[in-house]
Image: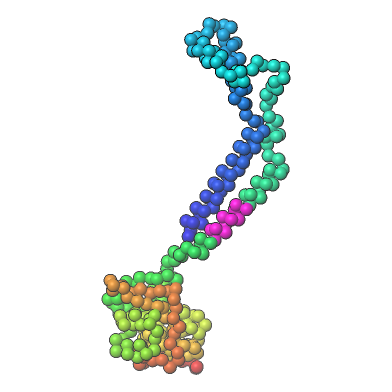
Amino acid sequence: MIVLAIVIPILAAAALIMLIAAYRRREVRSVTGRLSRRTRLRDRLARRSEEATDTAPTGREVERAAVLARREPDDLPAIPSDDDIPWTPPDPEEVGVTRRQFMNRSIVGFMTLSITGFGAAVLGFLWPPFVTGFGAVINAGTVDSLKTQVRDENGFLKLPEGRMWVTEYPEGALAKARETYSPAVLGGMEAGLVALYWKCPHLGCTVPECVSSQWFECPCHGSKYNQVGEKRGGPAPRGMDQFATSVNDRGEFLVDTGKIVQGPPIGTNTTNQEAQGPHCIGEATE
């Protein structure tokens, strides 16, 4: 998209310059005019006649004279007369740009740029976006390597490039998950992973992990969620939102950060995970 935004204006400017140059060349030719074939032939013969007074004619000139003698009378060069109009150079003011020409060229240029801009906008709309990072599909790595990283980070792996938390989903809870969650997130859950959008669905605060309780606990208003993002307390209207996930043939965990799946409703607790220690945030009322 960036390449198109640079190349298209350059091409449009080049086309406009060529259009103006062709238009100006045509105007100059219309002012200066061109000598006819008959006049050019007469000038050549006049020059040769002047040279003939100083030197003897060559064989080629004699042959040329014989060829001209065999031509029709209309084709023979006419003798210069007093009626011939001498050539005069054009007036520089006539060759220059008049006000009308300037206005016409300005209108044509403006229309060309407008059409080019409209065409670029249409191409930008139809061309597939080249999105990377948040809003695109992120290859987070292989499932096995991600599980190892999650365990090394005390159960919570933070991936800033996708604005998400990656946690493990227990295999024993898959039966309930299939009854609760949409196919968009089940692919990752069946592989043992879940990708959670780190924004609290209450008012959008970034939700940190609490290592002691093994829950997510929002510092803004005290909403709490278990390790897979299901709401366990606080004023949030639902569980943490999730990203659509899948696993490819190479065993890589793909997270579509451009497709946010709304979190599970209040009361969902497929993993039955209770707080495993003290809370990092004080209790909050519903």
Along the line of sight, the residue nearer the viewer: 52 or 93: 52
Residue 97 visible in the snapshot: yes
Quarter of the image for residue 268 reads: bottom left
Q: Residue at x 50, y 93 (%)?
A: 286
Q: Residue at x 70, y 30 (%)?
A: 91
Bounds of the magenta span?
111-121
**Residue 227 rendering spot, x and y as whole percentages:** 37, 85
Residue 280 visible in the snapshot: no
Compared with 243, 60 (above or below) is: above
Along the line of sight, the residue nearer the viewer: 134 or 204: 134
Quarter of the image for residue 42 reads: top right
Compared with 16, 215 (above or below) is: below
**Residue 284 rendering spot, x and y as whole percentages:** 48, 91
Whether residue 161 appears in magenta in the rendering, the answer is no
Q: Residue at x 49, y 88 (%)?
A: 237
Compared with 154, 125 (above or below) is: above
Along the line of sight, the residue nearer the viewer: 225 or 175: 175
Q: Residue at x 56, y 55 (%)?
A: 116
**Residue 45 rendering spot, x and y as whole percentages:** 58, 15
Compared with 150, 278 (above or below) is: below
Total marks drawn?
0
Whether residue 113 appears in magenta in the rendering, the answer is yes
Q: In the shown orientation, is residue 228 left or right of residue 100?
A: left
- The colour scheme used here is rainbow
Along the line of sight, the residue nearer the viewer: 190 or 208: 190
Q: In the shown orientation, is residue 279 left or right of residue 99?
A: left
**Residue 200 rendering spot, x and y as whole percentages:** 47, 82
**Secondary structure that dominates the magenta span:** helix
